């Protein structure tokens, strides 16, 4: 049976009347029942298979040439998926829908011009109280401008299971709590406007995350990385990764 998403969702209307204006005004927004239960179930099945087969590894922290795992700071297990791999067809379809939503926002995203993104980061918090401390996805101008997270957790009760993503818009004292509910898509600016944390999870928590790049900032980041790489190679023959995500 061919994969399909819910035909009742008007992507252009969502992009222009919901996503773009809310990103510009609030800095974040989320959409529920975006893909439909059938496709959501297929994605969840693929992610569970990746987890069961041992494809997910400890998430790394930026700031070390080879990454460093510190489970008290970040307790998720992750894998980078393009969506073209065998057995990941549903993930690929979800990515194509998110791509379409972002593309439809077009020139309604302020100064940003988006033309590429990262692979999908499949993430699992194993339910042992693991979370991710407050952080910023793009604190250094690596090009990432929009963070998109698709949640896969059925019958999630935040009062019991925890796992809330808490955003601190503009780094202030006010917060926005987003529960990781099944078939929910969250979007927010990736830079210092949105520090956020994943609160401890007490049940298995799955999500897909992709980052969209602003073309101008990404090009500048690549040039900086090229210069740094040349200096580093001449000194110690080691490589500095340009950012935490994989493109």
Image (spheres, rainbow, N blue to C red):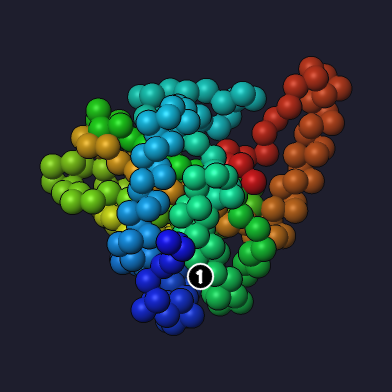
- Apparent side of residue 228 relative to residue 122 in the rendered image (left or right): right
Q: Residue at x 75, y 22 (%)?
A: 238
Image quarter (top left, top right, bottom left or bottom right) of the N terminus: bottom left
The residue located at (67%, 33%) in the rendering is: 241
Q: How many marks?
A: 1
Q: Residue at x 33, y 35 (%)?
A: 125
The image shows residue 180 at horizontal and vertical percentages of 29, 51
Camera-nearest residue between 146 and 127: 127
- Which of the two residues, 34 or 240, is positioned nearer the viewer here? 34
Please name the residue shown 43% across and 66% down the image.
4
Q: Answer with the quarter of the image where residue 31 lies.
A: bottom left
Above or below 64: residue 23? below
> Residue 9: where, in percent of width, then height?
39, 76
Determine the secondary structure under disc 1: helix
In the image shown, does 5 or 19 lie closer to the viewer? 5
Question: Does residue 7 lie above or below 85 as drawn?
Answer: below
Which residue reaches farthest left?
Answer: 160
Using residue 223 as the reference point, say whether residue 124 is left or right of it.
left
Q: Position of residue 179 (x, y in %)?
A: 26, 53
Q: Is residue 196 above or below residue 6?
A: above
For mark 1, does the 10 Å Cα neighbourhood hold few (<14), some (14 to 19), or many (20 or more) residues? many
**Spot occupied by residue 143 in the image (x, y as percentages of width and height):** 64, 52
Q: Is residue 244 left or right of residue 134?
A: right
* Residue that label 1 marks: 101
């Amino acid at each position: 049976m061919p994969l399909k998403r819910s035909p009742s969702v008007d992507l252009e209307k969502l992009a222009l009347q919901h996503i773009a204006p809310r990103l510009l005004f609030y800095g974040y927004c989320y959409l529920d029942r975006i893909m439909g239960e059938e496709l959501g179930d297929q994605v969840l099945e693929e992610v569970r298979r990746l987890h069961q087969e041992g494809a997910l590894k400890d998430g790394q922290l930026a700031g070390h040439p080879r990454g460093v795992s510190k489970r008290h700071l970040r307790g998720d297990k992750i894998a980078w998926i393009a969506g073209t791999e065998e057995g990941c067809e549903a993930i690929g379809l979800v990515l194509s829908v998110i791509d379409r939503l972002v593309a439809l926002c077009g020139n309604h995203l302020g100064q940003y011009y988006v033309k590429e993104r990262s692979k999908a980061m499949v993430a699992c918090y194993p339910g042992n109280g693991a979370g991710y401390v407050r952080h910023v996805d793009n604190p250094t101008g690596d090009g990432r401008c929009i963070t998109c997270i698709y949640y896969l957790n059925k019958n999630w009760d935040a009062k019991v299971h925890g796992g809330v993503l808490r955003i601190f818009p503009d780094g202030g004292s006010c917060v926005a709590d987003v529960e990781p509910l099944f078939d929910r898509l969250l979007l927010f600016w990736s830079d210092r406007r949105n520090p956020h944390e994943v609160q401890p999870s007490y049940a298995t928590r799955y999500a897909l995350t992709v980052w969209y790049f602003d073309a101008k900032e990404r090009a500048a980041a690549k040039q900086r990385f090229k210069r740094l790489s040349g200096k580093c190679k001449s000194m110690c023959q080691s490589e500095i990764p340009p950012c935490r995500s994989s493109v």
